[in-house]
Amino acid sequence: MSTGTLFDKVWDAHTVSVLPSGQTQLFIGLHLIHEVTSPQAFAMLRERKLKVLFPDRTVATVDHIVPTDNLARPLADSIAEEMMQALEQNCQENGITFHKVGSGNQGIVHVIAPEQGLTQPGMTIACGDSHTATHGAFGAIAFGIGTSQVRDVLASQTLALAKLKVRKIEVNGNLKPGVYAKDVILHIIRKLGVKGGVGYAYEFAGSTFEQMSMEERMTVCNMAIEGGARCGYVNPDQVTFDYLKGRDFAPKGADWEKAVEWWNNIRSDADAVYDDVVIFDAATIAPTVTWGITPGQGIAVNETVPTPDEMPADERAIAEEAYQYMDLQPGKPMEGIKVDVCFIGSCTNGRISDLREAAKFAQGRHVANGIKAFVVPGSERVKKQAEAEGLHNIFVEAGFEWREPGCSMCLAMNPDKLQGRQLSASSSNRNFKGRQGSSSGRTLLMSPAMVVAAAITGQVTDVRELI
């Protein structure tokens, strides 16, 4: 095995050939598909009279267009129903496992694969979705890909990719109460920028990540793409193995011992050479909220909206655009800004640990008058587990709506959309213009606990005040 970083080892192990272009033809161990980016890819296969080469390495679910309130078929949205039928038919014709609504296994693609043990260390994983980097939490190399690349993986189980540089992002120390994995990644993106990771894979290392649960690591890796990185990962360790053991697709018996030995071997070596190293102190990270129109425009909740003269010259134009779009004044405190909608869910923060933490702050409190607040579990398994623990009752009693699993108000390719100029406190991953379903809607990204604090008070609130 090659020495060096985990990225190098996994890349080399999956290299089929080096192409004349200089790109690597990389074997993809697991291909995840959903209803949005796959129909055109399957159509392109049919045009070329090609079959899916390894259907057993492809797993499908439906997540983006699924309503979270009424799942009756046919779906009320005729386009959504058409996309659902196309995925069902394509999976049936090609012998692909499809986790449909009501199967007990449906949910957001980046939630269901880890919880079923499909995602494992040392894998290469691809999906026609930006936030595929989530799976890097397991020590996998996971890429979001476009529709033509979905076609390529279906047809050949390979991708043509240029090898990335590797930046080690080390965070050390203990996070303070009220500070979560979401705050860590928002802080990193704030400091390094939304383009800082272009051309890189991010290796998240240091004692802070070592102390995180797998679900917290998934939150961090999920948003590596928002910092410009092509993928992000954490080296596998005992936390990883404990999470995976006994899951549906995890190795069993003697195979488990072999797998753990292999997984330990792919960890980055102590003397691995990185293209760049950046170090942060966990103690300096506070609950973080975005104020602008990129995930890099974030500040500590107790800070004020930055003024142009506080920024590098090349960031001032987009800052001016953000002030205007978000209706925010430079120098204004973030705390106290009124919100309209509060959303807990998405592939970033829709897992059971997110719901448990949010429920702690919702219990015994109530959503402020005029606030629409709702919770969307990341999968049918998460919903079942949350209900077994009574979390849904805590949310409902506090005035939140309890919904069915799906992507919901993240990309908002479903009925869950902002209306007009509404301002959303969101646990999702993007605050682009129009991201949550309204062309003029506005989004503030924050942790699930911070979303609850905003829902209870009706305004941006430091969750530490509720501890």
Image: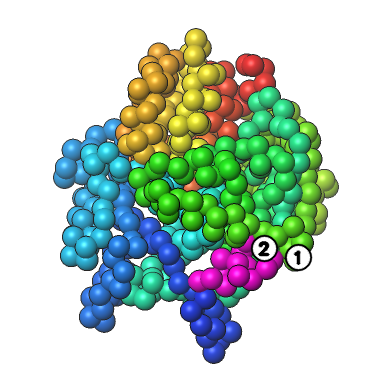
Q: Which residues are magenta?
A: 1-14
Q: Which residue is mark 2?
A: 5
- The disc labelled 1 sits on which kind of residue? Val
In the rendered structure, are the residues bearing label 1 and label 2 in contact, judged by CB atoms less than 8 Å apart? yes
Q: Is residue 437 visible?
A: no
Is residue 387 shown above or below 240?
Answer: above
Q: Is residue 54 left or right of residue 213?
A: left
Residue 119 versus residue 52: which sits nearer the camera? 119
Residue 212 appears at what percent x and percent y? 62, 37
Residue 82 magenta-highlighted: no
Q: Is residue 321 left or right of residue 52?
A: right
Q: Is residue 82 left or right of residue 114?
A: left
Residue 317 appears at what percent x and percent y? 71, 55
Q: Is residue 28 visible?
A: yes
Q: Quadrant of the N terminus?
A: bottom right
Q: Quadrant of the C terminus?
A: top right
- The disc labelled 2 sits on which kind of residue? Thr
**Residue found 47% across the figure and 28% down from its top:** 355
Is residue 345 shown above or below 313?
Answer: above
> Of the numbered discs in the image, which one, if any, rests on residue 273?
1
Residue 196 versus residue 102: which sits nearer the camera? 102
**Residue found 72% across the figure and 41% down from its top:** 207
